[in-house]
Image: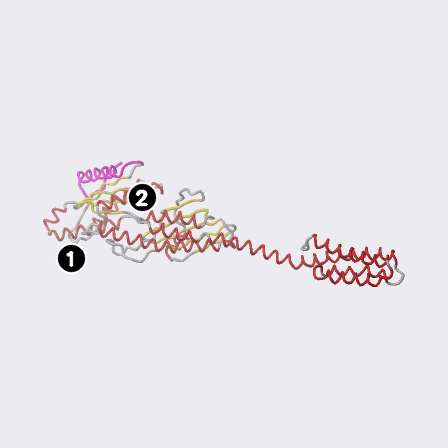
């Protein structure tokens, strides 16, 4: 009940005081009228504090009416006590009926306030994420930071994946499971849709909400690769949370994705600036130093993704004869055509560089050993079918290639040496061919 026990006690004391006043009138009949007035005075005095139970103080005065006497006093005194107690209990139940809904509303409001306070504490994490993302200088570094910050912003996350690509072939560049361990997988149809359409997708099921938000940098042209797009992709977050309680987590994930898009644009600008300084001026391919640096990163990514990494050494056949026959400007044009053919033949995510002179080097993820030879033949065919000078279709180019896979725990320079030895065997065997190194 809403009434405290002392309120009930005061009601009973008020009734007892009125009974005592009435008894005084019975003991001294000359003051009977004053005793009855005393009962009324007690009722009036108790009203401000007791309310309805104070009226019970009027009942003992009834014993002075007629020939009541002591028997009437006992009955009316008992009636006063009972009435005072009943009135106090009735008031308590009435107040309960009015106050309990208010108490429930207060509890609900307090629970919502506590939940909101808990959720608001997450928003400073967006600032921390912004600072961390702004420090990223490489795509894989950016993806790893974004995945980690997504788990911080949304602790309900069961799984987080970051998919990125410069075309339609999205790759999982970073991923974490609920325990914070790496969790890489291929994108599904929803993640490819979000990356292509740049639209957020939210899928709800019992006890789980999945948020897939787009990541897109500016549509800038990549230095040295005409027509190429800036990186784009999606962040996919699975939340172990009921749909009706996921609003804050979803909003924070979407906000993080927008920050990720800005950071991705910054990473792209850094890569473009680095590319302007570290690319071959003639062909637009990576320079040797930059290629080696990126190759180390690609090896680490291949090991995380548990996929084979192919290395290709490509050397143009008889470029000196070509220069002697058609001139050095024609030879320079031939080098540019071979560089373009090499890039076209590589799968998405591949790297290509001008190794030196008429020699090129490339790397790309493949599925198996069969894919290794296939990528070499694709490059060889692309070079052989190219037209270095459309005005002179009779001018043809060929190239010899050595291909190999990066072995587990092997330094990349050792891999390059094996590919170079295979290239030498291709030249010894008649050129315009591919040799595979084990």
Residue 161 place in picture, x, y as percent: 40, 48
Quadrant location of the C terminus in the rendered image: top left
Q: Is residue 227 above or below residue 351?
A: below
Residue 253 place in picture, x, y as percent: 43, 53
Quadrant location of the N terminus in the rendered image: bottom right
Q: Earlier in the sequence, mark 1 or mark 2?
A: 2
Outermost residue toward the left? 324
Nearer the observer, 257 or 306: 257
Residue bearing mark 1: 391
Q: Is residue 174 above or below residue 93?
A: above
Nearer the observer, 220 or 41: 41
Q: Is residue 400 magenta?
A: no
Q: Is residue 426 magenta?
A: yes
Q: CA distance from mark 1 to mark 2?
A: 37 Å
Nearer the observer, 319 or 196: 196
Numbered label tally: 2
Q: Is residue 212 above or below residue 401?
A: below
Residue 381 place in picture, x, y as percent: 23, 47
- Does 34 sit left or right of 432 as displayed? right
Residue bearing mark 2: 366
Callout 2 secondary element: loop
The residue at 70%/53% (across/down) is 6
**Other-residue count near label 1 (Cα within 10 Å), few / some / many at <14 / 14–19 / ≥20:** few
Callout 1 secondary element: loop
Residue bounds of the magenta highlight: 409-438
Quadrant location of residue 289?
A: top left
């Amino acid at each position: 009940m809403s009434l405290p026990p002392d309120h009930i006690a005061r009601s009973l004391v008020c009734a007892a005081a009125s009974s005592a006043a009435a008894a005084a009138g019975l003991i001294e009949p000359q003051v009977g009228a004053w005793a009855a007035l005393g009962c009324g005075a007690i009722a009036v005095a108790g009203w401000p504090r007791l309310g309805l139970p104070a009226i019970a103080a009027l009942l003992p005065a009834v014993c002075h009416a007629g020939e009541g006497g002591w028997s009437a006093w006992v009955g009316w005194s008992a009636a006063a006590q009972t009435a005072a107690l009943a009135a106090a209990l009735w008031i308590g139940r009435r107040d309960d009926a009015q106050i309990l809904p208010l108490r429930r509303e207060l509890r609900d409001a307090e629970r919502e306030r506590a939940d909101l306070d808990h959720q608001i504490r997450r928003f400073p994490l967006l600032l921390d994420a912004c600072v961390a993302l702004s420090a990223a200088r490489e795509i894989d570094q950016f993806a790893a930071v974004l995945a980690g910050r997504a788990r911080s912003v949304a602790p309900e996350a069961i799984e987080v994946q970051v998919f990125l690509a410069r075309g339609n072939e999205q790759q999982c560049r970073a991923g974490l499971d609920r325990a914070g361990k790496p969790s890489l997988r291929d994108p599904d149809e929803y993640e490819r849709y979000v990356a292509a359409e740049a639209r957020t997708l939210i899928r709800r099921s019992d006890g789980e909400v999945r948020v897939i938000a787009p990541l897109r940098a500016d549509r800038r042209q990549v230095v040295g690769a005409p027509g190429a797009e800036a990186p784009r992709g999606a962040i996919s977050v699975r939340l172990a949370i009921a749909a009706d309680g996921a609003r804050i987590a979803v909003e924070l994930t979407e906000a993080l994705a927008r920050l990720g898009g800005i950071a991705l644009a910054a990473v792209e600008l850094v890569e473009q600036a680095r590319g302007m300084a570290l690319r071959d001026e003639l062909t637009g391919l990576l320079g040797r130093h930059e290629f080696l640096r990126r190759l180390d990163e690609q090896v680490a990514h291949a090991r995380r993704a548990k996929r084979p990494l192919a290395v290709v050494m490509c050397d143009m056949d008889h470029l000196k004869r070509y220069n002697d026959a058609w001139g050095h400007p024609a030879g320079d044009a031939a080098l540019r055509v071979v560089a373009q053919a090499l890039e076209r033949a590589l799968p998405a995510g591949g790297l290509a560089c001008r190794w030196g002179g008429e020699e090129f080097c490339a790397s790309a993820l493949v599925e198996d050993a069969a894919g290794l030879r296939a990528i070499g033949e694709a490059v060889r065919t692309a070079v052989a079918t190219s037209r270095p000078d459309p005005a002179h279709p009779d001018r043809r180019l060929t190239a010899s290639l050595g291909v190999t896979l990066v072995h587990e725990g092997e330094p990349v320079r050792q891999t390059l040496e094996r590919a170079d030895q295979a290239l030498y065997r291709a030249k010894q065997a008649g050129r315009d061919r591919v040799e595979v190194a084990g």
